[in-house]
Image (cartoon, rainbow, N blue to C red):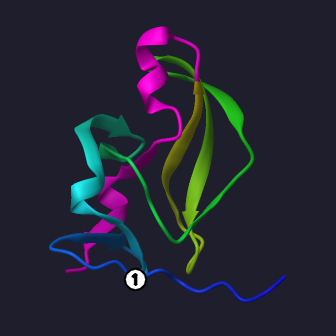
Amino acid sequence: MGLTYNVYLSGGRIYGCKTCKTHLSNHDDILSRNFRGQHGKAYLFDQVVNVTESEPNERNMTTGRHVVRDIHCRQCKETVGWKYDRAYETSEKYKEGKFILEAELLCTVS
Protein backbone atom coordinates (compact mmCIF):
# COMPACT_ATOMS: atom_id res chain seq x y z
CA MET A 1 0.00 0.00 0.00
CA GLY A 2 1.53 3.28 -1.12
CA LEU A 3 1.25 6.80 0.15
CA THR A 4 -1.96 8.69 -0.45
CA TYR A 5 -1.79 12.35 -1.32
CA ASN A 6 -4.52 14.90 -0.82
CA VAL A 7 -6.12 16.46 -3.87
CA TYR A 8 -6.09 20.27 -3.86
CA LEU A 9 -9.00 21.86 -5.69
CA SER A 10 -8.92 25.16 -7.53
CA GLY A 11 -11.81 27.43 -8.25
CA GLY A 12 -13.88 30.14 -6.69
CA ARG A 13 -15.32 28.49 -3.60
CA ILE A 14 -13.87 25.35 -2.07
CA TYR A 15 -15.50 23.47 0.80
CA GLY A 16 -13.22 21.76 3.28
CA CYS A 17 -13.32 19.77 6.49
CA LYS A 18 -14.14 22.08 9.39
CA THR A 19 -11.64 20.27 11.63
CA CYS A 20 -8.52 20.27 9.44
CA LYS A 21 -9.40 22.38 6.34
CA THR A 22 -8.67 19.52 3.89
CA HIS A 23 -10.35 20.20 0.53
CA LEU A 24 -13.52 18.15 0.01
CA SER A 25 -15.46 19.64 -2.90
CA ASN A 26 -16.02 22.60 -5.15
CA HIS A 27 -19.08 24.87 -4.94
CA ASP A 28 -19.85 24.09 -8.59
CA ASP A 29 -20.39 20.40 -7.71
CA ILE A 30 -23.46 21.11 -5.53
CA LEU A 31 -26.51 19.45 -7.06
CA SER A 32 -28.99 20.40 -4.33
CA ARG A 33 -29.11 22.36 -1.07
CA ASN A 34 -32.44 20.87 -0.06
CA PHE A 35 -31.15 18.16 2.31
CA ARG A 36 -30.95 17.62 6.05
CA GLY A 37 -28.36 15.64 7.94
CA GLN A 38 -27.75 14.68 11.52
CA HIS A 39 -26.38 18.18 12.25
CA GLY A 40 -28.92 20.19 10.23
CA LYS A 41 -28.48 21.62 6.73
CA ALA A 42 -26.71 19.41 4.18
CA TYR A 43 -25.81 19.56 0.48
CA LEU A 44 -25.91 16.93 -2.27
CA PHE A 45 -22.62 16.90 -4.23
CA ASP A 46 -21.81 15.25 -7.52
CA GLN A 47 -18.23 14.49 -6.46
CA VAL A 48 -15.95 14.84 -3.46
CA VAL A 49 -12.23 14.26 -2.89
CA ASN A 50 -10.00 13.35 0.05
CA VAL A 51 -12.52 11.06 1.77
CA THR A 52 -12.58 7.43 2.82
CA GLU A 53 -15.76 5.36 2.78
CA SER A 54 -17.06 2.99 5.45
CA GLU A 55 -18.84 -0.29 4.71
CA PRO A 56 -22.31 0.04 3.13
CA ASN A 57 -25.40 -0.37 5.30
CA GLU A 58 -29.14 0.06 4.85
CA ARG A 59 -30.79 3.04 6.51
CA ASN A 60 -34.36 4.25 6.72
CA MET A 61 -34.19 7.92 5.83
CA THR A 62 -36.79 10.64 5.39
CA THR A 63 -37.15 9.82 1.69
CA GLY A 64 -37.20 6.03 2.08
CA ARG A 65 -34.80 3.14 2.44
CA HIS A 66 -31.26 3.58 1.04
CA VAL A 67 -27.93 1.76 1.08
CA VAL A 68 -25.37 4.34 2.21
CA ARG A 69 -21.84 4.52 3.52
CA ASP A 70 -20.44 7.16 5.84
CA ILE A 71 -17.63 9.24 4.40
CA HIS A 72 -14.72 10.48 6.50
CA CYS A 73 -12.08 13.15 5.94
CA ARG A 74 -8.94 11.35 4.79
CA GLN A 75 -6.72 13.67 6.85
CA CYS A 76 -8.36 13.80 10.31
CA LYS A 77 -10.86 10.88 9.99
CA GLU A 78 -13.83 13.07 10.99
CA THR A 79 -17.19 11.94 9.59
CA VAL A 80 -18.32 14.63 7.12
CA GLY A 81 -21.38 13.00 5.50
CA TRP A 82 -22.40 9.94 3.51
CA LYS A 83 -22.53 8.46 0.01
CA TYR A 84 -25.65 6.96 -1.56
CA ASP A 85 -24.92 3.51 -3.01
CA ARG A 86 -28.48 2.46 -3.73
CA ALA A 87 -31.98 3.88 -3.56
CA TYR A 88 -34.95 1.52 -3.59
CA GLU A 89 -37.53 4.11 -4.67
CA THR A 90 -37.50 4.95 -8.38
CA SER A 91 -37.90 8.65 -7.63
CA GLU A 92 -34.73 8.59 -5.49
CA LYS A 93 -32.42 6.83 -8.00
CA TYR A 94 -30.79 10.16 -8.95
CA LYS A 95 -28.96 10.08 -5.59
CA GLU A 96 -27.03 6.89 -6.37
CA GLY A 97 -23.29 7.53 -6.46
CA LYS A 98 -23.76 11.04 -5.05
CA PHE A 99 -22.48 12.48 -1.76
CA ILE A 100 -24.03 14.37 1.14
CA LEU A 101 -21.80 16.78 3.05
CA GLU A 102 -23.24 18.34 6.19
CA ALA A 103 -22.90 22.13 6.35
CA GLU A 104 -22.06 22.10 10.07
CA LEU A 105 -19.00 19.92 9.36
CA LEU A 106 -17.69 22.10 6.49
CA CYS A 107 -15.79 25.34 6.16
CA THR A 108 -15.05 27.55 3.16
CA VAL A 109 -11.36 27.17 2.32
CA SER A 110 -11.20 29.76 -0.44
**x and y, in percent, of residue 19 in the image:** 42, 77
Residue appearing at x 60%, y 49% in the figure: 70
* Residue 23 sits above or below residue 91 on the image: below
Residue appearing at x 26%, y 72% in the figure: 14
Q: On the rendered image, what quadrant is the C terminus found in?
A: bottom left
For the magenta stretch, what is the residue range?
A: 87-110
Residue appearing at x 31%, y 45% in the figure: 42
- Is 30 situated left or right of 98 in this image? left
Q: Secondary structure at mark 1?
A: loop
What amino acid type is highlighted by mark number 1? Tyr
Q: Quadrant of residue 69?
A: top right
**Mark 1, residue position:** 8
Q: Nearer the viewer, residue 43 or 85?
A: 85
**x and y, in percent, of residue 4 in the image:** 66, 84
Does residue 108 belong to the magenta stretch? yes
Label 1: how many Cα within 10 Å (few below 14, some 14–19, many 20+)? few
**x and y, in percent, of residue 32 in the image:** 25, 38
Residue appearing at x 47%, y 80% in the figure: 7
**x and y, in percent, of residue 85 in the image:** 61, 35
Q: Nearer the viewer, residue 3 or 63?
A: 3
Disc tally is 1
- Is 33 situated left or right of 76 in this image? left
Q: On the rendered image, what quadrant is the N terminus found in?
A: bottom right
